[in-house]
């Protein structure tokens, strides 16, 4: 049993001349690392090295806006009374499902404008997305949010966690499940799985859909431990409903695209739009 006061980690990374929060810095780091990985893989798959840079310039701001709007909509009782809080994304409150909706919509439009296969772009980006999510969850850790229900210190120590994680899970006199960590680890395993699936040479689109299935399975179970979930009804968590829907939709798309012959290309097939987007 720890004796003495436990001080939470400072959520501010830099406080002069501007304030930079760990939350934003960690999410930004995940996004940059994911971009680098996607760019390298895109070049191997015959795409211009600037394709994913161009895509991210649109996708990231749109995804952030959609992630925030998604969160605000389902917390409208609070934000309708405190409209000034809507822009305070540095304090947390970005819903991943909202961000994915924005990113996917942006990718669809971008691919159509550039004359590329959306599914190919999505397949290449899938490992980067899940790795970015794994890293981004540590922003929640710094903000002491996205945690689960109460536990004992002995429980956390039984997980053989580093002291700094155990102490950060001590919030207002109570220890909590580090669900941010559970999801981060689940996503790291998913990242490794997707890298392996690249070598399987699945039908185009199935790598991305495999990401959706893997992430959604983990999110469904981990969400059940959380205490800050967005709720559809008093007993129905929105994230769990969305996760089930995404799993069903992804499996259906894999089957339908194969049966109807829409999935004619494989992941390792060269891009057909060589006139514009091949590597120079």
Image (cartoon, helix red, strand yellow):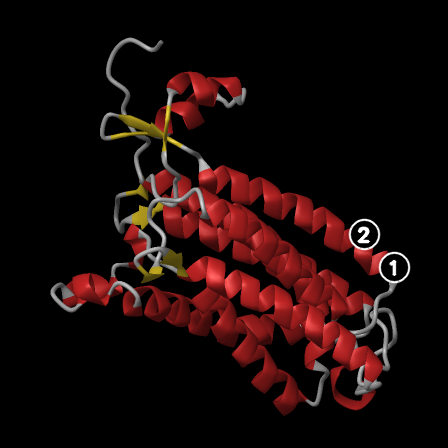
Q: Residue at x 33, y 39 (%)?
A: 144
- Identify whether 51 is placed above or below 261: above
Task: Categorize mark 1 by other alpha carbons within 10 Å: few (<14), some (14-19), many (20+).
Answer: few
Q: Residue at x 53, y 79 (%)?
A: 106
Q: Residue at x 45, y 59 (%)?
A: 239
Q: Quadrant of residue 231?
A: bottom left
| Residue 126: x %, y % from top left | 66, 62
- Identify whether 220 is placed above or below 4: below
Screen quadrant of the N terminus: top left
Say whether residue 151 is left or right of residue 198: left
Q: Which residue is mark 1?
A: 200
| Residue 111: x %, y % from top left | 64, 84
Q: Which residue is mark 2?
A: 196
| Residue 85: x %, y % from top left | 19, 61
Screen quadrant of the C terminus: bottom right
* Residue contact between numbered discs 1 and 2, judged by CB atoms under 8 Å: yes
Q: CA distance from mark 1 to mark 2?
A: 7 Å
Q: Say what secondary structure mark 1 lies in.
A: helix
Numbered mark located on residue 55 in the image: none
Whether residue 57 appears in this view of the structure is no
Task: Categorize mark 2 by other alpha carbons within 10 Å: few (<14), some (14-19), many (20+).
Answer: few
């Amino acid at each position: 049993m720890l004796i003495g006061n436990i001080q939470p980690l400072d959520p501010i990374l830099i406080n002069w001349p501007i304030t930079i929060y760990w939350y934003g810095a960690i999410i930004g780091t995940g996004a940059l690392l994911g971009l680098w990985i996607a760019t390298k893989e895109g070049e191997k798959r015959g795409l211009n090295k600037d394709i994913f840079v161009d895509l991210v310039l649109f996708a990231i701001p749109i995804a952030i806006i959609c992630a925030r709007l998604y969160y605000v909509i389902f917390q409208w009782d609070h934000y309708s009374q405190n409209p000034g809080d809507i822009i305070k994304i540095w304090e947390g409150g970005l819903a991943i499902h909202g961000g994915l909706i924005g990113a996917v919509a942006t990718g669809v439009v971008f691919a159509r404008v550039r004359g590329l296969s959306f599914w190919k772009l999505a397949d290449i980006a899938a490992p980067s997305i899940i790795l970015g999510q794994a890293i981004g969850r540590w922003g929640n850790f710094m903000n002491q949010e996205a945690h689960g229900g109460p536990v004992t210190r002995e429980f956390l120590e039984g997980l053989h966690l580093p002291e700094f994680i155990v102490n950060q899970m001590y919030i207002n006199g109570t220890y909590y499940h580090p669900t941010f960590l559970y999801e981060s680890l689940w996503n790291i395993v998913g990242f490794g799985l997707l890298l392996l699936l690249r070598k399987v040479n699945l039908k185009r689109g199935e790598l991305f859909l495999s990401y959706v299935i893997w992430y959604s399975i983990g999110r469904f179970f981990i969400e059940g431990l959380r205490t800050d979930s967005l709720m559809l009804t008093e007993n129905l968590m929105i994230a769990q409903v969305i996760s089930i829907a995404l799993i069903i939709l992804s499996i259906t798309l894999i089957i339908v695209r194969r049966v109807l012959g829409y999935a004619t290309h494989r992941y390792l097939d060269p891009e057909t739009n060589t006139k514009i987007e091949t590597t120079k």
